Amino acid sequence: MKEVILIRYGEIFLKGKNYSFFENTLFKNIKRRLKEINLKLEKISGRFLISEFCEHDKEIIISKLKTVFGIVSISLAYEVETSLENISNICKIININKPTFKVETKRADKSFNLKSYELSAKMGELILKNNPNSKVDVHSPEQIIYIEVRQNFRTYIYYDKILCLGGMPVSTSGKAMLLLSGGIDSSVAGFLMAKRGLSLNAIHFYSFPYTSPQAKQKVIDLANIIKKYTGDIRLFIVPFTRIQEEIHKNCDSEYMITLVRRFMMQIAEKVAIQNNCSALITGENLAQVASQTVESITVTNQMSKILPIFRPLISFDKIEISNIAEKIGTYETSILPYEDCCSVFLPENPVTHPKIEKIIKNESLLDIEELINDAIKNIEIINIKN
């Protein structure tokens, strides 16, 4: 008998002929996440299995597995060589701490001489004998004892399933560029798209001296928090001061936010393409602020001419977004009072329904290509390593 950790995955089973690609990627992601811990990680049919770990590493392993996209649940289990005697010996030592229980068996190894329901009944009777204060309830039990008779001539017995993140393994859907602002929304947006299998680069627009070094550090800190879910992140810090000053000096003030957003999209797309990204990600949410009306989003969209823009938070309210931020650990950093470049030269009455004719007229007053090229030429790159 030894203690092991069973790892289950979900959507991968739907992938047909591509199944092995998704399974192998998840296996590599798990291995990378646990690389500093001495253990054995292996595949068994429809599962991954961790064994040969130290007792004091157990909680660390579980904590790390709960940050890996693609894992649906994990269980601490007893592993024994398949035999009725070995299974019985484990069931004899199980303590039931609930008033009712049942035994649920999956028999993948059809050569085992008892059928699933027969083994469940036999082990249920044995467990009941050693736990006289509990009762068997096959319909609505408060505790379930699981027995899996696997095809590797091993049986796994456990009574708890620890829910994990689910989703798809990171990097199975390609790579995208996240516009990381430093607020609550954008890091959550990156987390949600990584859950769908995207690996991330990130881009931040920095307007020193109008925004402080602490604002830049906040974004670096956010990238360091979400990297445990997404893997390594290449963070591009774009010097944005000159662009904002030129807009402020030459253009209608009410169009400041709209023009800034259009510049951001053009720069983000160029940097994304240069770094083999196939999409952009923003934390925009419909109707949350003036720059997030249908009309504003439409004129912003026009500036990403090749890549799609993913907005996973488009229908979320602020409470829903904040709840996710708290869950993933970004909330406290996001609310630190260091404002990003979107707070620079804010107009009193920003336009909420921008007209494309006026936008084009304002942009004609700027040397857009030169401003963009200058910003890209002076980008600072920070590699956020997991």
Image (tube, rainbow, N blue to C red):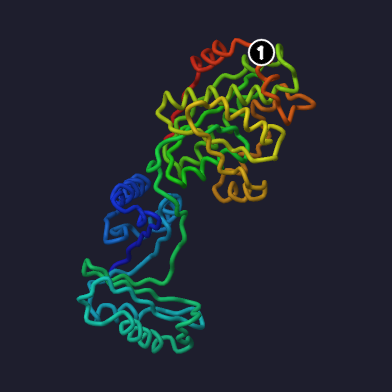
Please tell me in which quadrant of the rendered image residue 233 appears.
top left
Q: Amino acid at mark 1?
A: Glu
Task: Tell me where residue 194 appears, x and y as whole percent.
Answer: 46, 43
**Left or right: 245 as drawn, with respect to 62:** right
Please tell me in which quadrant of the rendered image residue 314 appears.
top right
Give 269 or 153, whichever is nearer the viewer: 269
Q: Assign a secondary structure to mark 1.
A: helix
**Going 29% across and 69% down the picture, which residue do you hit?**
79
Task: Tell me where residue 87 appears, x and y as whole percent.
Answer: 28, 78
Q: Which residue is the extreme one toward the front?
A: 357
**Going 62% across and 51% down the picture, which residue do you hit?**
323
Where is the N terminus found, in terms of image quarters? bottom left
- In the displayed structure, 67 sits above or below 102; it is above
Please tell me in which quadrant of the rendered image residue 221 appears.
top right
Give 242 or 251, whichever is nearer the viewer: 251
Give 144 or 175, whichever is nearer the viewer: 175
How many discs appear?
A: 1
Task: Tell me where residue 142 appears, x and y as whole percent.
Answer: 50, 78
Give 264 or 156, whichever is nearer the viewer: 264
Q: Which residue is the extreme one toward the right?
A: 348
- In the displayed structure, 280 sits above or below 87; it is above
Q: Which residue is labeled 1 in the image?
A: 246
**Going 72% across and 21% down the picture, which residue do you hit?**
345
- In the displayed structure, 53 sits above or below 153; it is above
